[in-house]
Amino acid sequence: MLLGACFLALLGLGALGATGRAPRWVFLGSAVASAGLGLVGAIGLPATPLPFGPPWGAAQVAVDALAGWFLVILALAAVPACLFAAASPPPPRAEGAGFPLFLAGMALTLIAADGFTLMLGFELMSLASWALVAARHATGAGRRAARLYLAFAAFSGICLIGAVGLLAAGGGLGFAAMRAAPPEGWRAAAVLALVLLGAGSKAGLVPFHVWLPLAHPAAASPVSALMSGAMVKIALYVMIRLLFDLSGAAQPAWWGLPLLGLGVATALIGALRANLERDTKAILACSTLENMGLMVAALGLALAYRGADLLPLASVALAAALLHALNHAAFKTQLFLSLGAVYSLAGSRDPDRLGGLIHRMPWVAGCAILGALSAAALPPLSGFASEWLLLQALIQGFRASDMSVQLIAAASLAVVGMAVGLAAAAMVRLVGLVFLGRPRTPRVAGAPDATGLMRVALVLPTLLTLVLGPLAAVALGVLDGPIRQVLGPQAAAPRFGLELALGEGGSRYLPGLVALLLALVVGGLVLLVRRRSPREPARGPAWDCGFLPPPPHMPFGDPLSQVSALGLGQPIRRSLGGLAIAPREWLVNQPPGSPAAATLRVEGQDRGFTRLLYPLARARRALSREAEQLRGLSLRFYLGLTFGTLVSLLALVALLERG
């Protein structure tokens, strides 16, 4: 009853949003419906046939432990995003209609109990999110980003339809029938490849990641928060559902190696790109790439360990992926909304036009700094616990009997360590440029702080991030259900009481104790400084880095006396940037006698364009030229071509029937 009411409410709110009336109530109603979906996820729902569906049978829905976990994640990301949207200026009609439908599509994907309903929800999610990306851009770069995203969404859907069709070939489209007849041989390998292509492109795995740093900045801030905090987790859920749950437990260990390799590569590329971007939302989008790479790497490791009959280590890796999905939803939603508040109130997403906002926007800055610390995986905040589990699972790779698993796990450990360090550097760069230093423009110097509903939207995920850190073991206790459902009744979450533990004699991490010790140390230092300080602290002007005093026409200081986004990222760009982009630098000198300063120009092209999209575009043009030559052929040739195609399709159907 509650589930149906939530879906009917979202559909009604979508219709109301299309009229352009009461946009604030559309988003507030979406927040209530999202909270209801989260409650359904916590309660669960047995398999239930619906009174409608495709011609071959009724659609089915169910909320098991795995779907319930991701429904809770969806609710935790959606509620603050909806509240922030309600506090923002009225959006275009397309955005008001697409926002509730986007939520409905994600929820329908999660509650589906058959392949048809799964793909129906997935495609609704893709189309609604495309409309949200394109809603505010009739032309220009935003529209091009929307078209690119639509192309990848269509590719993702086509691949997943093929994967679901192969899984259903053994008995039917229902999940129960798929579990009873898991794929084997070439069909299993084809399912793995299609899921990697379909769900991987939606999750942003390399080389299909190029849409994500472009689509997030083009969308409104609440939409970006939903896309990063929830939508990419739907792709993660589809991977787990199709590869772990529906493909059976008898798949070999090598099944996990493609996911592990692509995951660590995506994590490294995303962390590098986050240090090189000049748009705050693009920085966060690339950080999402890094985190999704870590989650997919954890899934690959879990598949490899399950195939090697190392069920306890598979439980650790799967717990790392599921826990990090929750943690990332909390801190990344909070970061997107915080930087959205900066854009709304300070008027820019360019770090070189911001600065000093910790004084003007203390609430926004405090929330953003806590989110950035969690994204940097610093203990005892939430991001550390799940990444610690992943690193521990990688360290145990030597226990696998397969030498290839051992070597790839060891190499992945080094790459993941580098990615985590680069992600921390990206967060330092983001916080330093946006919130520290001096204001770079008059509007930034007079920016107001977030108030009312916008402040509530920022505080909710911030509190969740603070709570999930010390109570990570409690969250792992909830994960017992999804882990046992996916890996079997013998599996369990890696915890012992309030500790994260890898079994008897294994590594342990007690986040609550770490949080308490850090609080005591910081509190003791503050008290010591206050007792030893002879005077009250005095505030003075920011250090100008040794530059001369600014002229009178620069009341906010000379911009050259503060480091720029390009300058702060230059060491990483010159040493490692070639892995992610094709960078190009050149010096623009001024003519003799000119008082203007020479400038350093930097450009870069993502290698996903140069290695994937540009060759595809050239191939499309070549095929178009070849197809153009068919216009002059005879009628006899056309009839022969049609007959040959028909015979080939019949032969393919006969071959599949025999298989």
Image (tube, helix red, strand yellow):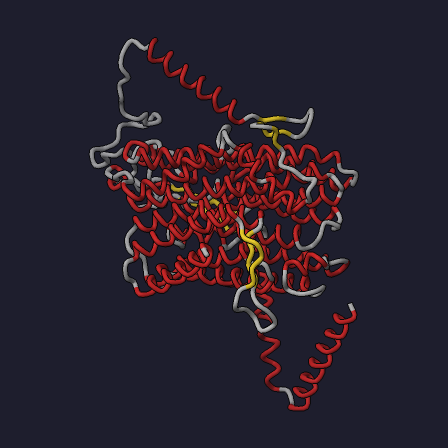
Residue 305's image quarter?
top right
Q: Is residue 612 above or below residue 584?
A: below
Task: Residue lying at the far front in this picture: please name it.
Answer: 1
In which quadrant is the C terminus drawn?
A: bottom right
Residue 1 locus on image (x, y percent): 46, 57
Residue 347 as seen in the image, left or right of residue 628: left
Residue 136 locus on image (x, y percent): 35, 59
Q: Nearer the viewer, residue 143 or 605?
A: 143
Q: Is residue 87 above or below residue 150?
A: above
Q: Is residue 215 visible?
A: yes
Q: Is residue 425 visible?
A: no
Q: Nearer the viewer, residue 417 or 141?
A: 417
Residue 186 locus on image (x, y percent): 75, 60
Q: Nearer the viewer, residue 646 or 253?
A: 253
Look at 49% across and 52% down and name the residue there: 231
Task: Residue lying at the far left in this picture: please name it.
Answer: 552
Task: Residue lying at the far bottom in this picture: please name it.
Answer: 635
Residue 638 locus on image (x, y percent): 65, 86
